[in-house]
Each structure stands twice: as structure tokens, then as C-alpha cells.
Amino acid sequence: QVQLVESGGGAVQAGGSLRLSCAASVSIFSFYAMNWYRQAPGKQRALIADITSIGSTNYADSVKGRFTISRDNAKNTVYLQMDSLKPEDTAVYYCNAEARKVGGEDYWGQGTQVTVLS
């Protein structure tokens, strides 16, 4: 059973920073990519950043230049460094492990709340 455990959420003033962590119970190299999603109240869950097993990264326009995704394969952990936070970044943030094979099983963490105060 694969487990993903997020941590690092909380409340922060606008302009501040937070670093989220996602610790996996298995090697993250076994997945095609590790992703961060977020879901704001009343909105759909949306992909905001991803990092492949070879380290390629992509970001949603809404966070580009402010957020940085990284991975530590030795620790089986993925990070999301969030800087210059805005109130609109308020959401529950979820870690996702994307399967290598089409039709393979993806895994989700339980989510961590990020609240940005104006």
C-alpha cells in the first residue's frame, strides 16, 4: 500500500513563504511524475506543478515564478517551495504520484491546508 503524507501547510501573511513536503512510503522513482494539485473552496482540483523522474518540471501559469517543485529521491520526498504567496493561493494542497504505465494506479495524499491572509 502506497502512502503519501503531506506536511508544511498553515496560515501565512500575503507575501510570505511556505514549504510543503510529501513523503512517500515507496521509492518515488517508481512513478512517472510527482505532482502537486490544489483545490480552493468551490473550485475543481487543479494541477499546479509537476516533476518527472528525470527532474523535468512544469508549472501552472498562476504559480510560475513563485513556486518551485523539487524532489529528493533518497528521502522519497517531494517539496513545493511557495514564495510571494497571495490570498488566491488559499487552498488544500494535494500530493499525487502518477503511475508510469497507462492504466496504472495513481496515489494521493490526504491534503494540507494553506491559508494566505491578506
Image (tube, helix red, strand yellow):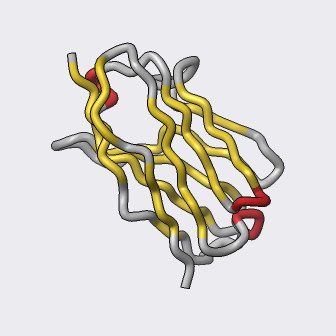
Give the left or right position of residue 19, taking residue 88 as reference.
Answer: right
Q: Position of residue 2 (x, y in %)?
A: 56, 78
Relative to the observer, which residue lies in front, 7 or 108?
Answer: 7
Q: Position of residue 44 (x, y in %)?
A: 29, 47
Q: Position of residue 96 (x, y in %)?
A: 52, 59
Count of numbered circles on the image? 0
Residue 68 position (above or below residue 26): above
Q: Quadrant of the C terminus?
A: top left
Q: Residue furthest bottom?
A: 1
Relative to the observer, which residue lies in front, 68 or 117?
Answer: 117
Give the left or right position of residue 112, taking residue 61 as reference.
Answer: left
Classify residue 70 by image quadrant: top right
Q: Residue at x 70, y 64 (%)?
A: 28
Residue 45 position (above or below residue 3): above
Give the left or right position of residue 100, taking residue 106 as reference.
Answer: right
Residue 70 position (above or below residue 76): above
Q: Quadrant of the N terminus?
A: bottom right
Classify residue 99 by image quadrant: bottom right
Q: Residue at x 67, y 55 (%)?
A: 33
Q: Residue at x 22, y 22 (%)?
A: 117
